[in-house]
């Protein structure tokens, strides 16, 4: 009887070692239970073999990492501990708060808003970066909203909803501003057109895109007006969590107003270019031509921004985000900053705007600056039609 039990124990031990060799984790755990039931004591040699086995160790480590990652992604993006750390730090330079915009957001939900894909290095090398003469004198403070107060689009704060469309907002909003600045045409262009119709040329729609490719699309294909093709989410994120995540809208190529023609409503950019990362060149570009699109890295603490000049203090890296840069300035304490318009509605940040350190490439804010000049294509036809309508009214 004893011999039979010993044989069974050795048999299970043999199977255990075979499972260990073949990396069959399910069978391994089964036979571990059987061994435990028979009170078979694992020798130090077996224990060493267990911990030494690289495949099993890797699987256990992966499972633990996956568990912790899942817990992190499902936790709230806004944390009282983060806000407290920033507000109690004398060196932070900005105020944190529990912003209503993300009161019910998890980390995973927040990450979906960060839709900037990194531009491939070959594209960065092949696309010339615009620079401006150093002799150009620039003001110490500049705000595009007051410099071109006749342009209503510059001061708008929009809401991208629960879609990673920031790359499209930054491009279309900047081009809208530039049409007013250069041609005195107050027009609101369609983010929805670019988001839905650019397709793989720009990236993955609500799952992210490339700012430079967006500007190239504006140059080659143009976008219609917001009146023709309004943004697919007219509610925004005033509702808790904005769940579920939005899918990219379909490209319809037809104005919602049947009296408007799609092609006739198109507005174009002359070109697409990068701006040199030197702060002087970025300032000069905005000063001469209007707001630009910038992309930067977002960390957990950025979701808590309320006011002041942002710099990364704490929290993990979450993704890339694109916004519109509209000016610059210097605080009374001597801190240089960029002034930017976000598209997370006015409940977030400083009435929808934020400031970030200038001249130190904070979070890569000066690395990826893109823009394009507005084109007169279709504008002549638009003016002619307006004149014809005016003549018909007399």
Image: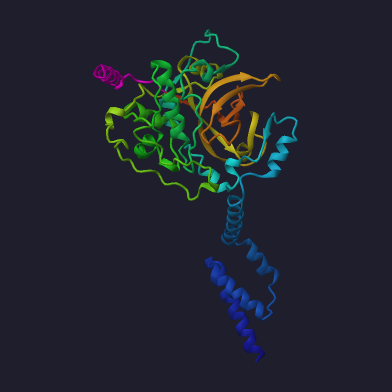
Q: Residue at x 70, y 76 (%)?
A: 41
Among the 4 quarters of the image, the one containing residue 353 = top right
Among the 4 quarters of the image, the one containing residue 337 = top right
Q: Is residue 317 visible?
A: no
- Image x and y of residue 130, in percent: 45, 18
Position of 391 relative to 69 (above/below): above
Number of numbered labels in the structure image: 0
Position of 33 relative to 305 (above/below): below
Quadrant where the C terminus is found in the figure = top left
Q: Is residue 312 visible?
A: yes
* Magenta range: 372-394
Among the 4 quarters of the image, the one containing residue 101 = top right
- Image x and y of residue 50, in percent: 63, 65
- Name the residue nearer the viewer: 70 or 36: 70
Q: In the image, is residue 283 part of the stretch drawn in magenta? A: no
Quadrant where the N terminus is found in the figure = bottom right
- Image x and y of residue 268, in percent: 34, 25
Q: Residue at x 34, y 43 (%)?
A: 250
- Name the residue nearer the viewer: 230 or 81: 230
- Name the residue nearer the viewer: 331 or 214: 331
| Model colouring | rainbow
Q: In the image, is residue 389 part of the stretch drawn in magenta? A: yes
């Amino acid at each position: 009887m004893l011999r039979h039990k010993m044989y069974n124990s050795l048999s299970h031990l043999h199977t255990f070692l075979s499972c260990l060799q073949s990396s069959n984790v399910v069978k391994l755990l089964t036979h571990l239970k059987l061994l435990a039931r028979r009170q078979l004591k694992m020798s130090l040699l077996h224990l060493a073999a267990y911990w030494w086995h690289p495949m099993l160790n890797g699987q256990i480590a992966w499972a633990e990492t996956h568990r912790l990652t899942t817990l992190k992604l499902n936790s709230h993006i806004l944390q009282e501990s983060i806000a407290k750390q920033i507000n109690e730090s004398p060196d932070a330079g900005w105020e944190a708060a529990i912003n209503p915009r993300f009161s019910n957001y998890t980390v995973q939900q927040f990450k979906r808003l960060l839709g900037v894909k990194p531009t491939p290095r070959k594209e960065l090398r092949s696309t010339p970066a615009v620079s401006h003469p150093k002799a150009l004198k620039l003001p110490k403070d500049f705000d595009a909203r007051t410099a071109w107060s006749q342009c209503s689009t510059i001061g708008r704060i929009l809401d991208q909803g629960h879609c990673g469309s920031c790359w499209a907002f930054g491009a279309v909003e900047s081009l809208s501003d530039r049409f007013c600045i250069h041609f005195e045409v107050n027009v609101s262009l369609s983010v929805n057109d670019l988001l839905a119709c650019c397709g793989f040329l720009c990236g993955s729609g609500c799952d992210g895109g490339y700012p430079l490719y967006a500007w190239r699309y504006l140059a080659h294909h143009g976008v219609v007006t917001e009146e023709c093709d309004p943004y697919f989410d007219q509610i925004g994120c005033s509702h808790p969590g904005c769940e579920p995540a939005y899918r990219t809208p379909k490209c319809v190529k037809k104005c919602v107003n049947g009296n408007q023609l799609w092609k006739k409503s198109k507005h174009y950019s002359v070109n697409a270019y990068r701006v040199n990362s030197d702060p002087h060149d970025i300032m000069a570009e905005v000063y001469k031509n209007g707001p630009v699109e910038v992309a930067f890295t977002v960390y957990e603490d950025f979701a808590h921004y309320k006011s002041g000049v942002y710099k990364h203090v704490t929290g993990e890296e979450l993704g890339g985000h694109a916004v519109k840069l509209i000016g610059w300035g210097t605080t009374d304490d001597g801190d240089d900053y960029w002034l930017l318009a976000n598209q997370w509605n006015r409940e977030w940040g400083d009435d929808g705007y934020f400031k970030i350190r200038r001249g130190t490439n904070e979070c890569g804010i000066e690395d990826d600056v893109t823009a394009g000049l507005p084109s007169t294509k279709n504008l002549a036809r638009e003016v002619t039609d307006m004149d014809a309508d005016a003549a018909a009214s007399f």
